[in-house]
Structure formats: C-alpha cells, structure tokens
Image (tube, rainbow, N blue to C red):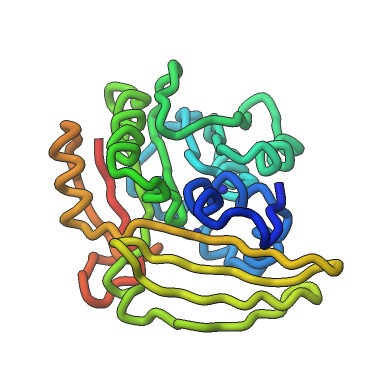
Amino acid sequence: MSEAIKPQTTNDKQQTNTWYSSWFDTPYYHILYKDRNYREAQIFMDNLTHYLNLPEKAKVLDLACGKGRHAIYLNQLGFDVVGADLSENSIAEANKNTNDTLHFVVHDKREPFEEKFDAIFNLFTSFGYFENREDDIKTLMAIKESLSEYGFAVIDFMNSQVVIDNLIPEETKEVDGITFNIKRFVLDDFIIKEIDFEDKGEAFHFIEKVRAYTLEDFQNMMNETGIYLLDTFGDYKLKKFHKNTSERLIMIFK
C-alpha cells in the first residue's frame, strides 16, 4: 500500500480523511517501504507489457506513480511514459529522471487526461483510498476516458480476502534507526494500518486506509461505468486468480 509531516497532536479524523495526501508526502513513507522488491516489479512490467503486446513507443500512463519506479522502467523498455501522482514531493523526486519520453505530473486520479494512452497502469494497490465509493467510480471513469480507442488499463490490487485472512494485528519494524510501531485491523469495509513512531524527539502518527474491494466489487463498479473486464491474474507472473489463495488481484480492462 501501498502516494507535510503531521505530528501526533493533529486531529486524527482530519488526517484519516486525507491520509494519502499527508503520509505519501513524507520522507518516512519511503523509509518504511525502502526494501520493496524492485526486481519483482520489473518482472511484472515485463510480463504485463508482453501480455498486452504493446506497440513500440506506445504511450503509457503510470497512475499514482509515487517516485516513478515503474514509470522509469517502462521508459527503459522503450515506451513513451507519463507518471502521475498526487504527492508533490514524490513528483519532484521523480522529475530528476525526466527525458524526451518520460514525464511526471502532479495529478488527481479522479480527473481524466486530455491526452489518450495506449495503456494505463494503476499499480501496487493504489486504488480504494477515498472515503466515498463515488470517488473510486470517478477514478474508473477517468481511466476509461483517458484510454485510446485500442488502449488497455490495468489495476494491480491486493487480494483483500487473503490480506484479511493473514492480517498481522501488531508489528514493529526498525528502519534507518527509526522504530515503526504498526497496528492493522478491519473497520467499516476498510483495511486500516496505524503507524506510530518517534524521530528527532517528535512523535508521529499516520494512517493507511484502503477499501477491501473484492473482484465482485470491481465487477459491479465496472458494470456501472461501462468498462469491460477482459482478464484477471493472481500474481506478478500472471498466474490465474484464485479467490482464497492468490497474492494479488490484477485486472485487465477497457
């Protein structure tokens, strides 16, 4: 869960409502998740672009790109890539990698692009952050409207059922000398992670909150928006999706 540092005294309700615009903009988000498997991400991009049979120099949008790790690799594969994210700090970092065929923009994923793309990727559980389901519907509509006539979109989401079945209620992780105390629980159809830590004498409290959408939930939203679900996979090697065992829920649609 996978996009202004707020002290612990900040009103928790306000922070919960905008957790993605505060937490993703801190350096601590990137510290906590610094050990993510980049090679696995590259293999996923190799498998995905091969499966989609994207033409050379295809226009690709990495929606909710963070610091751009997927976008940068997609560009290395020869695609014309735009990375978009709400986090100004992440985009500022990603912009260090720009070239003629790789650009990054600050963008709200609920808004469509004027530009049309051959492929739109929403990766690493970068969906379901909003309080209201209507905003997720808007995101799907924006993706649909930003695709070219023959374009494909991909959402790489967690398999909510497996995540809930294997939820670790409490965990402590030490990274770069910072001890992160993590609590996980399910509340009102959201999988919630509370993150508490101290750094330089100051206490911090952040929240990650992602709606526990199932494949059926996505199918219902896609039906509402006139989107066609073409295929589903259960991991980054594009093996078949199994509701009770698959690590991921990867959906190809248009």
**Based on the displayed image, in which of its 4 quarters is residue 233 positioned?**
bottom left
The answer to whether 40 appears left or right of 139 in the picture is right
The residue drawn where x is 85% and y is 69% is: 201
The answer to whether 165 appears left or right of 102 in the picture is left
Residue farthest toward the top in the current orientation of the protein: 114
The residue drawn where x is 28% and y is 27% is: 150
Q: Nearer the viewer, residue 130 or 159?
A: 130
The residue drawn where x is 56% and y is 38% is: 85
The answer to whether 9 appears left or right of 149 in the picture is right
The residue drawn where x is 27% and y is 71% is: 161
The answer to whether 13 appears left or right of 24 in the picture is left
The reply to whether residue 238 is visible in this rendering is: no
**Based on the displayed image, in which of its 4 quarters is residue 229 positioned?**
top left
The reply to whether residue 163 is visible in this rendering is: yes
**Based on the displayed image, in which of its 4 quarters is residue 34 positioned?**
bottom right
Up-down relation of residue 12 to residue 171 (above or below): above
Instruction: Give percent across and percent down for residue 128.
Output: 37, 50
Quadrant location of the C terminus? top left
Count all numbered tags in the image, as a single digit. Answer: 0
Q: Nearer the viewer, residue 33 or 137?
A: 137
Q: Which of 201 and 79 is in front in this view?
A: 201
Q: Nearer the viewer, residue 4 or 239?
A: 4
Instruction: Give percent across and percent down for residue 72.
Output: 62, 43
